[in-house]
Structure formats: C-alpha cells, structure tokens
Amino acid sequence: MEGNIAQMGQFIGAGLAAIGSGAAAIGVGHVAGNFLSGALRNPSAAGGQTATLFIGIAFAEALGIFSFLVALLLMFAV
C-alpha cells in the first residue's frame, strides 16, 4: 500500500514539473511574436535584433528542458 502511494506522489510531482515545458512553449511564442511585431514596425532594425531573438528563445527553451529534467528525475530517480 505504501509503495503505491509513493509511486502516485512521484507521478503527480512529475506531472506538475512537466507544466514547465508548456510554459516554455508559451514563452517562446511570446518572444517570437514580440520580435515579429517589432520587425514589422521597423524592418530596418530587425536584422540587428536577430541575435537577441535567438538568445531569448534559448533562455525560454532552457527552462523547459530543466523542467523536463526534473520531471524525469521525479519519475525514475526518486
């Protein structure tokens, strides 16, 4: 009985940690959308902001990868 409750807790914790992956997708969408909005307003400045776009996407995606890692650790290592 106790093993089943512990396993249930692992799966619930992993599911909650996996919410971060969805939040990272939302963050990447915001970064790309705001870049596109700014590029459409001032196309001449868009070329200089491309590096900033990729850095923002990388940071948002890194948080999603970290949350995925935590979810895997909760499921298999704890």
Image (cartoon, grey):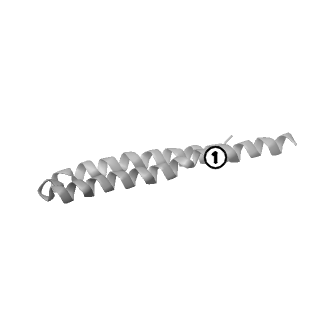
> Looking at this view, is 73 or 50 the one in front?
50
Side (left or right) of 15 relative to 6: left
Q: Position of residue 45 (x, y in %)?
A: 14, 53
Q: How many marks?
A: 1
Which image quadrant for residue 13? Answer: top right
Side (left or right) of 21 relative to 40: right
> Looking at this view, is 77 or 7 the one in front?
7
Which image quadrant for residue 50? Answer: bottom left
Q: Position of residue 43 (x, y in %)?
A: 15, 59
Q: List the single residue furthest toward the left.
A: 44
Kindly identify which residue carries mark 1.
Answer: 14
**Residue drawn where x is 58% and y is 44% of the image:** 17
Residue 76 seen in the figure: no
> Looking at this view, is 60 or 65 the one in front?
60
Side (left or right) of 57 relative to 52: right
Q: Quadrant of the C terminus?
A: top right
Q: Position of residue 75 (x, y in %)?
A: 67, 47
Q: In this rendering, is residue 40 above or below 70?
A: below
**Residue drawn where x is 20% and y is 51% of the image:** 49
**Residue drawn where x is 88% and y is 43% of the image:** 1
**Residue drawn where x is 43% and y is 46% of the image:** 62
Residue 7 seen in the figure: yes
Q: Amino acid at mark 1?
A: Ala
Q: Position of residue 2 (x, y in %)?
A: 85, 39
Q: Secondary structure at mark 1?
A: helix
Neighbourhood count class around disc 1 (C-alpha, 10 Å): few under 14, some 14–19, many 20 upward:
many
